[in-house]
């Protein structure tokens, strides 16, 4: 192999939503100097919203992404509440919370059982043709079936409220369009015991097998970083509202009780010429030192307690794995996701017993009382910001969206760099590296569909470059 002229292309990352490309850059000594996770398509959704009426924004932004419509719907409705300057009725708050829990359950179930369990249970070096949900069905039919059932439960919660599985424009500025029906409530309650049983068994299974992946846990996305997310006023786990908290890798809380409207005091966004996805960072630490992670791992590091008993027990055990320091390995996003499923099922159970869910007082009517508003909630993948400016008639002048996958962008780049440094030898990409890098990025459960505001899937390509920009090696899988 000559020094120049080898291209290394990593085959499609088939279980990420959306499309991207990874390039690795070697220095003169053949060491991996830089790794870039490119997002190469952009539809300009923020621009597209300009001129639209505020009231249509939940429905419009719910169509940004086929994977996380509920998250955008809720953040958008909350930005609308802020512009109307209303406190939404208590029933509406609880109903929106219930929908978000349904979204977390279905999304986390998809991530764990369908996308990651094939790696975890069949092995990262197992036959790629079988290392998917169909292979899982053949080898571990009970787990595959459980995963489908749990995801269905989350989808049923969403459907019972929004009326449709995808893109429900049910949340609106000021509240929601309709309460839960008594019949739906009884149907959902009947499914709770099975959902909780599946969630608990999945957590037990993960604890049992996670020891097999100690090399991956060390080499794939294990580094100090900041963590950012919502917590309740008194520091508990939060998924829908609350205040922003930032923690450093040692566990020190470096920002707390921050009103989500003031998010710009915490977050700035950098741009790189090689990616359409921006790079949010913690403003005070600068770019790129202010890299932070959001999502399940961040939320479990940030909060001091879970709201329900089984989830709190699980959180304590989760934190003990790092000796009560923050858990810094991205491999444990999987673990955190399972703890959050338990919390979501338990919390949904509490909410479903609340008589407010059937109340007909679910919407505050008001006009435009502010010309800007911010809505923040925790999407399954992490904190989601919708920031709108409107004119006096409520027509959109400007939109800024900061999505979870964008906020994990720096950390995903670092994960790829760390994996490359660990596994790349002799200017070649070894067998099995493709699977590792794919698994490393997948731990974040990135939504590239959201990131690029595009639909569909496209392969991830990885190219290894030498010091003079020459391509060095290529590996593809059909
Ligand atoms: Mg933006
Ligand atoms: Ni999305």
Image: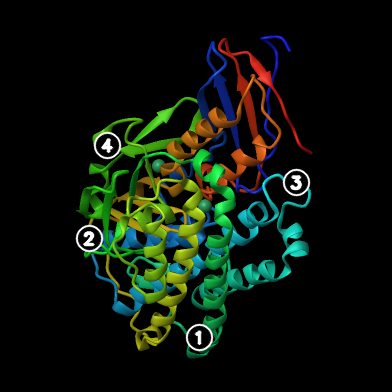
Q: Which residue is mark 1?
A: 189
Q: Earlier in the sequence, mark 4 or mark 1?
A: 1
Which quarter of the rendering shows the N terminus? top right
Residue 24 coordinates in the image, percent (x, y): 57, 25
- Callout 3: SS: loop
Q: Secondary structure at mark 2?
A: loop
Query: Alpha carbon of mark 2 to alpha carbon of mark 1: how far?
Result: 39 Å
Of mark 3 and mark 1, the one earlier in the sequence is 3
**Between residues 99 and 58, which one lies in front from this camera angle?**
99
Q: For this view, does 396 lie left or right of residue 449?
A: left
Pair 3/4: label in front: 3
- Residue 278 image-quadrant placement: top left
Residue 296 location (% of width, % of height): 43, 56
* Residue with the mark numbered 3: 128
Residue 283: numbered disc: 4
**4 and 1 marks in contact (CB < 8 Å):** no
- Which of the marked residues, 2 or 4, is nearer the chain's N terminus? 4
Name the front one of labels 2 and 3: 3
C-alpha gap between disc 4 and disc 1: 44 Å
Give the distance between the C-alpha atoms of the residues marked 3 and 1, in whole angstroms.
Answer: 39 Å
- Between discs 3 and 4, the one toward the N terminus: 3
Q: Residue at x 37, y 32 (%)?
A: 270
Kindly identify which residue carries mark 2.
Answer: 369
């Amino acid at each position: 192999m000559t020094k120049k002229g080898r291209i290394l292309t990593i085959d499609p990352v088939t279980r990420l939503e959306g499309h991207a490309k990874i390039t690795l850059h070697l220095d003169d000594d053949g060491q991996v100097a830089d790794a870039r996770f490119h997002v190469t398509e952009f539809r300009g959704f923020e621009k597209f919203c300009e001129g639209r009426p505020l009231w249509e924004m939940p429905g419009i932004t719910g169509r940004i992404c086929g994977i996380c419509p509920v998250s955008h719907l809720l953040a958008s409705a909350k930005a609308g509440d802020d512009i109307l300057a209303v406190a939404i009725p208590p029933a509406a708050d609880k109903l929106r919370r219930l929908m978000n829990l349904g979204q977390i359950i279905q999304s986390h179930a998809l991530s764990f059982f369908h996308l990651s369990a094939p790696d975890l249970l069949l092995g990262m070096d197992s036959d790629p043709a079988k290392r998917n949900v169909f292979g899982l069905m053949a080898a571990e039919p009970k787990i595959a079936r459980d995963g489908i059932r749990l995801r269905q439960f989350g989808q049923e919660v969403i459907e019972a409220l929004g009326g449709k599985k995808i893109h429900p424009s049910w949340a609106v500025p000021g509240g929601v369009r309709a309460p839960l029906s008594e019949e739906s409530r009884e149907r959902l309650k009947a499914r709770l015991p099975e959902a909780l049983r599946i969630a608990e068994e999945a957590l037990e299974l993960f604890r049992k097998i996670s020891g097999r992946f100690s090399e991956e846990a060390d080499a794939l996305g294990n580094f100090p970083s900041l963590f950012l997310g919502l917590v309740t006023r008194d520091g508990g786990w939060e998924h829908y509202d609350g205040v922003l908290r930032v923690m450093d890798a040692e566990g020190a809380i470096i920002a707390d009780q921050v009103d989500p409207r003031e998010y710009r005091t915490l977050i700035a966004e950098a741009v790189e010429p090689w990616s359409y996805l921006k790079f949010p960072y913690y403003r005070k630490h600068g770019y790129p030192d202010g890299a932070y992670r959001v999502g399940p791992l961040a939320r479990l590091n940030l909060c001091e307690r879970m709201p329900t008993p089984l989830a709190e027990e699980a959180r304590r055990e989760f934190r003990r794995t790092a000796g009560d320091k923050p858990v810094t390995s991205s491999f444990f996003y999987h673990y955190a996701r399972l703890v959050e499923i338990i919390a979501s099922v338990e919390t949904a159970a509490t909410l479903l017993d609340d008589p407010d869910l059937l109340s007909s007082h679910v919407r505050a009517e008001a006009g435009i009382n502010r010309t800007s508003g911010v809505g923040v909630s925790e999407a399954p993948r992490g904190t989601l910001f919708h920031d709108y400016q409107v004119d006096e008639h409520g027509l959109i002048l400007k939109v800024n969206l900061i999505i979870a996958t964008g906020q994990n962008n720096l950390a995903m780049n670092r994960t790829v760099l760390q994996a490359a440094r660990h596994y790349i030898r002799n200017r070649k990409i070894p067998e099995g590296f493709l699977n590792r890098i794919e698994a490393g990025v997948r731990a974040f459960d990135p939504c590239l569909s959201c990131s690029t505001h595009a639909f569909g899937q496209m392969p991830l390509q990885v190219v290894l470059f030498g010091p003079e920009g020459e391509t060095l090696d290529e590996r593809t899988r059909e």
